[in-house]
Each structure stands twice: as C-alpha cells, then as structure tokens.
Image (cartoon, rainbow, N blue to C red):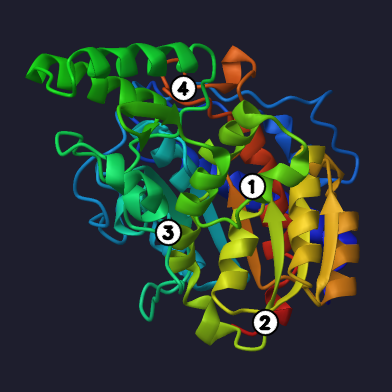
Amino acid sequence: MNHSHGETEASSSKAFRRAEEMHTSGIPKGKKLKLDDDYSHAFLGTYNPETNPFEPKSTGVPMSFPSKELHKVAKGSLDDGVKIPQTTRQMEARCPYIFYGNVLDVSHETWKRISQFLYAIAPEYVNTQSFSALSRKEGYIHNLPKNNRSNIFPRSPATVVDAMPHTKEWWPSWDTRKQLSSINPESQGIYQVCEKLGKMLIEERGVISVGQQTEILNQCKRLNLMWVGHYKLTAIEPEQVERILGYPVCHTQSGGLDREERLKLLNHSFQIDTVGYHLSPLKSLFPVGLSILSLHSGIGGAEIAIHNLGLRLKSVVSVELSETNQRILRTWWENTKQGGKLVQIKDISKLTSVKLQSLMDELGGFDLIICQGPYTPSTSKAALDPENPAAFDFRVFFEFFRVLEIVRNTMPSKCQC
C-alpha cells in the first residue's frame, strides 16, 4: 500500500463529500437530504456510531418496488429521471469490485437514494422465480460485468413439488401453486388452521366449492402449507426452505435456533442461485480464487454462492453482528473444508482505517466488497423511511459506505482488474 494513513483518511472524507453532492442531485428543490457536516469523522479511527449517530431524513414520498420492467433500467440514468454525472460512471470500472444486494421490499425512493451513494450505479432488479421455487423481488447494485453470466449447477428446485416430491401424490389439481410467494416464519395457530382445513375436506369428501378452494388456497399461500397426506396439510419446514433457497440442508440448524427463528433468518437471506448468477462473472476474472470483504454477511449466502460457482475463497473477512449467524457461517466453512482464511468481526464500527489497512496488508487487499442489506426490525424512526414497507436503516447503510470508501481510496495502486 502506497498511501499513508493520513492521506487515506483525507481522501475518504473528500469522497464522502462527493457522495453527499451525488446523493442530493436530481432531488427537487426544497426536498434535499441534509447530511451532517460532522459525519466525516466516521472515516477516522476514533469513530463511534453510538456517540455520533447519523440520521438521514426522507427526501420524498416512497414509491412501490417496481413489479415490471425488471432488468430494463437504462445504464447512465435511473428510471425516474435522476441524472447521473459522467464522473460517477467512471466509478463502475474501479476496483475492488462492489456488490450490494437487498432482499427486502424497500421503496423505489430508497433504491434511488442508495444508488446515489453507490456512485450512481443503476440498480438491477430480478425475481428469484427465474432461478428457484421462490418468487421474490431482489435488487442489486454492483460494478461487475453483465456478460458471461452462468448458472450454479446443480440448480435448486424450480417448483415446490420438485423441492418436496413426497407432496406430489397428495397435491390437488385446484392448488395451482408452483412456487412460494413468501417465507412466513409464523408458528402460532398453524396446527389449528391445518386441523380446521383438513376437517372441512374430510366432511366434504374432497369435493368442495370454488369458494372453499379459494379459502384453503389463501391460507396455504399465507402460511406456506404443504400437502403431506390425504386431506392433510402441514407447515413447511426450515430444511425444505433451505433447499428452495439453495443452502445446504440443516444449514441454519447449527445456530441452535427453533423453527420460527430459522425461518426468519432464511426469509432475510439471499437466494443462492439468483445471487450466484449475478456473481458468476467472477469466475473468469479470478480463476485462481479471490479475497472478499463481506459486510453484514448474515448466514453466508454470498460466500456459499461463490463457493458453489467453483471459486476458491482465498480469504473472507466477514463482518456480522449476530453471534448465531457467525456460528452458522463458521460451521459451513469448516464442514466444506475451505482452505482459505476466515476472519470474523462482530462490530462494523471496529473497521477503522487503521484496522482495514492492517487487514489489507495481511491479506493483500480485497478483490470484492459485498454487502447484504441487513434486516433491522427495531430502529429509530429517524433512520427509516416512514412509509417504507421494510425496515431499511440508513445508518447501517452508511457504515457500509464508510468502509467501502476507505478501501476504495486505499487500494487503487494494487488493483489488478
């Protein structure tokens, strides 16, 4: 590394100022987001998010997540007309590569704001139904090439029946479900619902009205109920959801969690085949393996996807607050006999410029910085979009951005891309 500690901090602080300008560009007059001038201290080694909280305000009325025109956001502009400065387009080619993904149903306005900080790279939206037995909209912002993409093999089941072939015998023709429309971790009252629906079918000897079919089907969709016997329904199990999402069976069991907790984790995790398809250009870029800085790793979806693509993980620095998630990732790492180095860090605020410099010196830098937008069920109102259907905390996002800027302003001289 040729940059001194002081130069890194100064350039990172300037980069944050540039991002501030990007963040407010294109927003109607009178609705610009006010960023704290003092937030530049976040790039210094003394940063403490508890004593220096950053709470952005909403820039406008949130819009719904686009349900159509997936993959059709034009390069160089966002689909709502926000102009992208030419200088920020050049950031797309800079190393290390970045990949930010979110599986939450965040608003269109939120995606616009995220994009303005991530060098105005347009989001890429995708529905996981093209890759799996789950139908869910996900969004990614990245600077990876979009050509030469390929699928993970073997692929995850394409339908629910493929994932659970034992249900095929009992699946009625009027239950038209092919994929899960959601992952519902709810447990309370499910047994009673299944008993009630089963009793209805038995009493009618399976010959039920269209209205009764609709009632049963609505409950099946809401609670993820599966046919496991003659007129018999039961809730989907975490192992079956793991298979649908592309994770090893019993992957979340190592965390010592109950059914509901495991399903909550899986609900907020990447679908492996989907994220793997978008990460697949890494195979030609780093044929001998790569080093990753993984922020908010969760249960290791990105790491598993890269491994399933056949790439060697030379080193992974995983930053994850949850000790349970850390244990799940560490167990997978050991079970798959990874030959690289796994460094686990709990608190992202500990990643100061000094710590990051030390890690980059030790590991030779990072080829990819990846972040999965974490689920934050309880956060201060000031950090959230008040009408956003998902709990997106911009303070958490800005921690990712802070780390990203330090690394990108330290590594250019070592970039091999």
Residue 7 x, y percent position in the rendering: 82, 61
- Find residue 401 and name its label: 1
Q: Are marks 4 and 3 in contact (CB under 8 Å)?
A: no
Outermost residue toward the left?
210
Who's the residue at 79% across and 30% down the image? 49
Give the residue displayed 38% in from the left and 28% down from the top. Answer: 233
| Numbered disc 2: secondary structure | loop
- The residue nearer to you, when weighing 65 against 38, is 65
Asked whether 266 or 102 is in front, the reply is 266
Residue type, numbered disc 4: Ser
Q: Which residue is mark 3?
A: 274
Q: Give the labeled residue for mark 4.
A: 58
Seen from the viewer's position, the closer of residues 223 and 150 is 223
Q: Residue at x 68, y 27 (%)?
A: 54
Give the distance between the C-alpha atoms of the residues marked 3 and 2, in whole angstroms.
Answer: 20 Å
Mark 1 residue type? Phe
Quarter where residue 288 is shown: bottom right
Measuring from the top left, give residue 371's x and y in whole percent. Answer: 61, 51
Residues at marks 4 and 3, CA–CA distance in whole angstroms: 30 Å
Crowd band around label 1 with a 10 angstrom C-alpha radius: few (<14), some (14–19), many (20+): some
| Mark nearer the N terminus (4 vs 3) | 4
Q: Nearer the viewer, mark 4 or mark 3?
A: 3
Q: Could one spot residue 156 in this view of the protein?
A: yes
Instruction: Nearest to the eye among marks 1 and 2: give it.
Output: 2
Q: Is residue 327 left or right of residue 296?
A: right
Q: Choose the circle earlier in sequence order: 3 or 2.
A: 3
The amino acid pointed to by label 2 is: Gly
Element at label 1? helix
Task: Residue under label 2, please give it.
Answer: 289
Residue type at tag 3:
Thr
Look at the picture and state if 322 lies above or below 307.
Answer: above
